[in-house]
Structures are given as C-alpha cells and as structure tokens.
Amino acid sequence: MQAGKDSSELEQIIADALALAAEQGASQAEAAASSGTGLSVTVRLREVETLEYHRDQGLSLSVYFGRRKGSASTSDLAPEVVREVVLKACSLARHAAEDPANGLADPARLAREIPDLDLWHPWDLEPAAAIELATECESAALDSDPRIGNSEGATVSTHAGCRAYGNSHGFLAAYPGSQHSISCAVLAVDGGVMERDFEYSVARHPDELLAVAQIGREAAGRAVARLGARKLGTTSVPVLYPARLARSLFGHFVAAVSGGNLYRKASFLVDSQGRQVFAPIVQLVERPHIPRGLGSAPFDDEGVATQDRTLVGDGVVQGYVLGSYYARKLGLESTGNAGGIHNVVVGDTGENFADLLAGMSRGLLLTELIGQGVNLVTGDYSRGAAGFWVENGEIQYPVHEVTVAGNLRDMFRQIQAIGNDLDLRGSIRSGSVLVDGMTVAGS
C-alpha cells in the first residue's frame, strides 16, 4: 500500500506555502502537511459488513504578523488551493488581536537531527486477504463456545502515510509511519442474559500483531467469563486496574499537567511541579524514540526535538506537558509536547499479575470502565464499572452495575503496586495497577 504523496512532495508544498506567506508580509509562518492511505474491513456474523478504502491528505497553516495569528487548512493540496489557504490565513491574521504568546517555537529547540524510529512498515493487504483475516478472527470467537450468541464483528485495518512540518525558522522535515490493527467484539448469552467483551491488537509492523484466531478466542473467553455477573453492596476495598485499563489513570495525570488546563486553572494539579503527587513507588518517563513505538516521534507538532525525560520520579512531578504557546503563557519553555505525549512508560514494582491479585487479597478486579466521570478541576473520580470480585487473592465471580469512586489526589497516593505486565497498545505504557481504599458502590 502506497503512502499517497511522499515526503519530498509534502515538503515542497510546505516550502511553497511558507514562501508565499513571506511574500504577503508575514513575519513568521508554519505549516504541517500529511498524506496517507488505508484499508478497513469489518466482518459480522461471517458476512462482510463494511469494506472501506481511505485516502487522506491535508495542510494546516498558521501565519503571524507580529503577535497576530491567522490559521487556515485544506484537504486539497492543489497549488491554487494552497495559495488560497495562505491568502486566507494572512487575511485573518491582519485582523486578529495581538497575543504575546503567539509565535513559532524557539529556534534553539527545533530538531537538528531526525532519527529513524523504524515507524514505516506498510502492509500490502488486498481486500480479499483482509476479509479472510477478519472472518477467521470472528469465526474463532463464534466457534470457541456455544454461549457466544452474537457478534459486533471483527475488524482488520491498515494505514500508512507521511507527515511533514516546516516553519520560517528554516525547519523542514518529514517522516513516514504506519499503523495496523485487528479487533473482535462478541456477546455471550446465557439464560437471556448477555455480556459483551472484546480483544484487539495494534502495531506499527503487521508481523507484530497477535494471531487473528488468538484475538477471537480471547474476545470470546472474556465475554463468557462475565456471564453470571452479580451486584455488590457498597464497600471500600482495593481495586486492581488491569494493564489495558491502567493507562487511563495516567492519562488523567497527563491531562491535568498539560499546558492548556494548567493555564486555565482547570486542573487539580496546578503548581504541582516539584510536589509529591503519587506514591513514592511511581515512576513515569517519556521515551519518544522507542523503535516502532505507537507514540514515537522525532519531533513534535512545532518541530521541537523530542527527547527522553522524567515526568514523575519517586512520586514527585518533575515536569509538565507543554507546547510553545502555553509554555509562554506559564512563563516556562516547551517540553516538546505540542500535539501530545510520546510513549509515557510507567515503571513497574516487580510483581506479575498473579502477585498483584494475591497482594490485593480481597477487592475488585476491573474489566471495564464506563462513561467519563472524571473532573480534572477537582480530581473527583466516579466511573461505572464491571469486573470480578476477589477473595483470598483468587477470582470468585463476575460483578456488574457498580461504580468505582474516589479522588485522583488520593488514588495516585494510594497506588500500592504496579505490575510488570506492560501493555504496549498506546502512547502510555503501563502494567496493572493496584489502588487501595476506593469506594465501590453497588446495590
């Protein structure tokens, strides 16, 4: 599968746009362009439900007249359209209000070398082959247990493309990337009661995806295991977040220390740098250059070089998540996170999943979280959930229709252990996390 326009074409489009912006009198300008192709197929109940080919491209441009900013974008990269977009952005900037924080990233922070992070592994997947894989995945689920009574389908998708960025400081660079995934969701039925669950795999390289039959069987096994779920009375117990759910906890932290929320005072972690926020066992590091990492990138959305750094050390916040604009608003410097984080890795405390279950002894093992239920301003946390009740370190029975609640300030400090069962399927890599003293509200 081809990537659409290649890096040199995208770089030339950006260079032309920046040159035109300068001709129009812009004191600074920046542009990002992307192009890619993809294929996605979903099979449900052994029949093809959707088969889609995607071809996407786009250009976004910001120009600055002093500290006045104008932005425009397009999905059409034809020269005449690009010219129109530049002229429109310049027109908007001339009428915009001045903002002292506007402007390009500090030239000293721009990436000078672009490391090869091994992100480009296109999958030459024809539609017939994709249908066969999705069918095999769903069939493995449907055939694994007679209680699998329905399916939401199995999906196989692939995407490959290229991203380029340039600005009037002389920065211009591009890098390709690919991402592929297989997923399956099914429903188990017993006595008129239905329970749903799923499994998935995602990777930069198709050879690193789990086998489709394994994904289907695991989706079915997870759904069947939830049959016979009971309700719980309200209690306060430890809660074990499995690795696939644990990243959400640290995602709330990342959001709370992101520039926009900090500047707007819309975070319970305002002025938290240098403060103890987590239990001392918690370590969070950002590793942007992990080969084939799903969050890997050689530079951020402003061309700032990404680099290894510590976000949390021994439970103490070491740094925020900032692009240039909010860094200036806060009187700080960009951390290379315009556009988001790049592979935040949560350090483990040495235990495997069985160790964590045994250490919890009595409590709730989560399998699903429902709804948002998180207030970043106060840290209040309340989410619908399902899972398994645990006694003496062993799973006893499934539970549903419960709520797990607490406050993130307390939850972060009450982390008891972090497993070594690292889940790599995202920009936050974490093992299972045991949190003490949460409220589990049921009937």
Image (cartoon, rainbow, N blue to C red):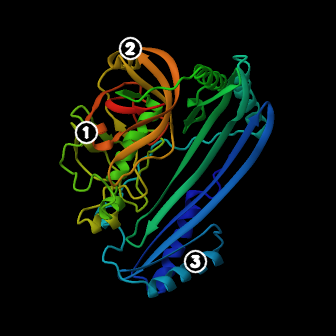
Residue 227 against residue 87 in the figure, above or below: above
Which residue lies at the image location 45% right of the left edge and 20% below the top edge? 389
Dot 2: element: loop
Is the C-beta separation of discs 3 and 1 under 8 Å? no
Q: Which mark is residue 85?
A: 3
Q: CA distance from mark 2 to mark 1?
A: 25 Å
Residue 10 position, x and y percent, is: 56, 63
Instruction: Answer with mark 3 or mark 1, whichever residue precedes in sequence.
Output: 3
Q: CA distance from mark 2 to mark 3?
A: 61 Å
Residue bearing the label numbered 2: 393
- From the viewer's perspective, tell me whether residue 413 is left or right of residue 183: left
Task: Please name the amino acid that badge 3 sits on.
Answer: Val
Residue 189 against residue 113 in the figure, above or below: above
Is the C-beta separation of discs 2 and 1 under 8 Å? no
Nearer to us in this view, 325 or 264:
264
Residue 391 in sight from this viewpoint: yes
Residue 310 position, x and y percent, is: 26, 43
Dot 3: element: helix
Residue 292 in sight from this viewpoint: no
Residue bearing the label numbered 1: 278
Within-10-Å neighbours for mark 3: few <14, some 14–19, many 20+: many
- From the viewer's perspective, tell me whether residue 366 is left or right of residue 59: left
